[in-house]
Image (cartoon, coloured by chain):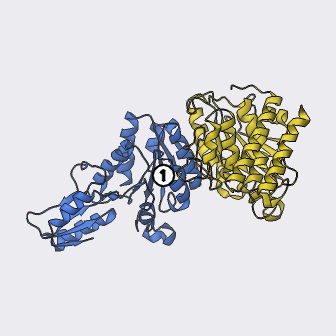
Amino acid sequence: MRNSFIKTLMEQARQDDRIFLLCGDLGYSVLEPFAEAFPDRFINVGIAEQNMVGLAAGLSLEGYTVFCYSIGNFPTLRAMEQIRYDVAYHDTNVKIIAVGGGYAYGPLSTSHHTTEELGMLRTIPNMVVTAPGDPAEVDGMTAFIAQHRGPCYMRLNKAGEPRLHAQPPALTLGGIVPVHVNHGATAAVFATGDMVGYAARYLEKSAPHIDLYSFPFVNPIDTAQLAALAARYTQVAT
Amino acid sequence: MTDTFDAASTTELARRIRLQCLHMCHTKRASHLGGAFSVADVLAVLYGGVMTADPAQPKSPQRDRLFYSKGHACTALYATLAETGYYDRAALDTFTDNDSDFTSHVNHKVPGVELSTGSLGHALSVAAGVALAGKRRQAAWHTYAIVSDGELDEGSNWEAILFAPHHRLDNLTLVVDYNKIQSFGSTAEVLNLDPLADKFKAFNWETIEVDGHDHAALAAALSKQGRGGKPRVVIAHTVKGKGVSFMENQLAWHYKSPDAAQFAAARAELLQELKDQA
């Protein structure tokens, strides 16, 4: 997912010279292409996440669209007050990107388990919170948040995730994305982020008659679409 | 007002700022008067001449930007903006009222306020980001940030303090309102900051110490001229509660709002200052 992110971000940055990327001393072997292509729009700010998010808010006040990239909980929990206040309350055009969502870095132990940030961020007004389900959704979501005016968060997994869509799905704010839909299915699974891939693999092997939907937007969610979808099934598992 | 300085006029402005702060804290039973009084001279010199600003166009792209990180001393900034023409003085009457933009920590919805602050240690990073944008665009405008002394306890400041000289943000000036008293004790008792100037020098900031109530010295220190590749810090040695004898250097005046008698006595002192000058 992280390579999809940087590839799409570079495409966006070629077209939009307001895009700026900050990282917290992480991104080795991932971010170099961006740094080489856009040296004036990339800064490694060091292991200083509160400053990174504050800088992003400041750059955004002057018209830049700023992406902040780090791992796990570092760009969120460590800088949560800056996100709440300098970013979300001021409606600055800052996009927080975390690689290693959930247990993607499981062996690195608890400090690198990213398990609470979705819950925390979705309580902050004005924050668009996303967790795309596969590299194609990451492509679509990266483009979406680059063009969306307002604060966003995107949780990425890591690398090597199965591709669930042939093309990046068209995304609308809060929209739900079908992954596998049978004709006349009575049960469905709703999943988000990395869990969509797990669900897809499990269902394909053990229950291919059950439909699968990805929720790349954790908040907001298109509730009308959700209600219509839920009405089609007698059983939904999340 | 563009980059001119006249001590008589900034002195008068500072007095009017203090009178407004006193009035706001009394009528609305608000706190933080001591820290508003300590920074009044800094604000008067900045808005009274040093900063390039157009009160009729608070978002003018060529303006100097000021990030007021010690947002609790909001009356001082609100009063300064009123007294320099960003809005009508009458707007201050809504201070702390429901539905008013004049909230008890500075709010960016008020014309002239760049950033809502109130959680200490945030605005210097934002100011550094703004200054960085200015560098990228080779802009002529300057960025100021004002922090309190106790505020420097917050570690987040020091991330920005490392960042700014590393990225040669010589279009950034930090002012420390060093009144030596924080909110539950003196800075010396709670968390000693000294030697403060030495710390900034070690962090590669151009460092100037001034009497924070000497307008000529402030004007020289805050000048945008003669910058050579480093951000500048102006450590303004100030007195909490400056301007009213019974408020000076008193921790209690971080919190207390003046009752009727205190209000009258303080007002008389501030007006007497004018009589004495005349």
Q: Chain of mark 1?
A: A
Quadrant hosting residue B227: top right
Looking at the picture, tell me which residue is in the foreground, B239 or A167. B239
Residue at position x 44%, y 34% in the image:
A17
Residue at position x 84%, y 35% in the image:
B217
Looking at the picture, tell me which residue is in the foreground, A21 or A6. A21
Q: Quadrant of the C terminus of chain B?
A: top right
Q: Amino acid at mark 1?
A: Ala
Percent across and percent down for residue B202 are 77, 48
B193 to the left or right of B171: right
Percent across and percent down for residue A199 are 25, 68
User: Which residue position is annotated with label 1?
Assistant: A88
Quadrant hosting residue B143: top right
Quadrant hosting residue B4: top right
Q: Total of numbered circles in the picture?
A: 1
Which colour is chain A painted?
blue
Q: Which chain is the one coloured yellow?
A: B
Percent across and percent down for residue A204 are 18, 68
Percent across and percent down for residue B175 are 74, 43
Q: From the viewer's perspective, is residue B61 above or below residue A80? A: above
Residue at position x 36%, y 42% in the image:
A147
Disc 1 element: helix
Q: Quadrant of the N terminus of chain B?
A: top right
